[in-house]
Image (cartoon, helix red, strand yellow):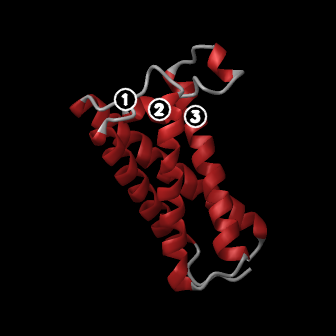
Amino acid sequence: MRKRNFVIKSIIAGTIAGLFLGFLFKYVEVTFNIRVYTLLLNIDFIPIFGNYNYPEFVEFLLHLLIAIGLSAVMVYIIYFKKYLKRHQLIVVILTSVLIALVYFPTTVLSNRTPALTSVEALAVWIVGHLLFGIVLASLYVIMFKNKKI
């Protein structure tokens, strides 16, 4: 399979998984007032970006770019490094949960995000990223079924 197809499919998978995570966190924030969506879109701590107030749409697009980038890295790791099929799901899900650890520095560095000690926010954040990994890995199984590079 051509590498271009892998790039396109990783962009599609990252976009879908990123939309899923964004909509899930928006629902949780609106319904339960747990500010995980605000945390997801937070860029206050980035030196140049933090100096401006961006509309939600722009912050969400930045989130999607990160999800797409993560998807491309995951495709590279699991397909180009030739992980066994049974390990691919585990690699993607564990990586997504590990990425959830950004909860701690981003929460400390912003006033808009949930408190560092918010057990509810931390639980939703980790479960959301676990689900993100499951969605991403499931899309890979569907999109890259029986494909060789």
Q: CA distance from mark 2 to mark 1?
A: 7 Å
Q: Quadrant of the N terminus?
A: bottom right
Contact check, label 2 and label 1, Cβ < 8 Å: yes
41 over 104 or under it: above or below:
above
28 over 51 or under it: above or below:
below
**Displayed quadrant of residue 146:** bottom right
Query: How many residues crowd around disc 2 within 10 Å: few (fewer than 14), some, or many (20 or more)?
Result: some
Contact check, label 1 and label 3, Cβ < 8 Å: no
Q: Residue at x 57, y 23 (%)?
A: 44
Which of disc 2 and disc 3 is earlier in sequence?
3
Which of disc 1 and disc 2 is earlier in sequence?
2
Q: Residue furthest front?
A: 117
Q: Residue at x 77, y 69 (%)?
A: 3
Mark 3 highlights which residue? 61
Q: Is residue 2 left or right of residue 10?
A: right
Query: How many residues crowd around disc 1 within 10 Å: few (fewer than 14), some, or many (20 or more)?
Result: some
Task: Give, as a three-letter code, the residue at label 2.
Answer: Thr
Q: CA distance from mark 1 to mark 3?
A: 25 Å
Q: Quadrant of the C terminus?
A: bottom right
Task: Give, as a three-letter code, the residue at label 3.
Answer: Leu
109 over 14 or under it: above or below:
above
As drawn, the label of residue 107 is 2
Which of disc 3 and disc 1 is earlier in sequence?
3
106 over 24 or under it: above or below:
above
Task: Report if residue 120 is visible in the image.
Answer: yes
Q: Residue at x 49, y 74 (%)?
A: 89
As drawn, the label of residue 90 is none
Task: Give, as a three-letter code, the residue at label 1.
Answer: Ala
Q: CA distance from mark 3 to mark 2?
A: 20 Å
As drawn, the label of residue 115 is 1
In the rendering, at what x and y percent does residue 113 appear? 42, 27
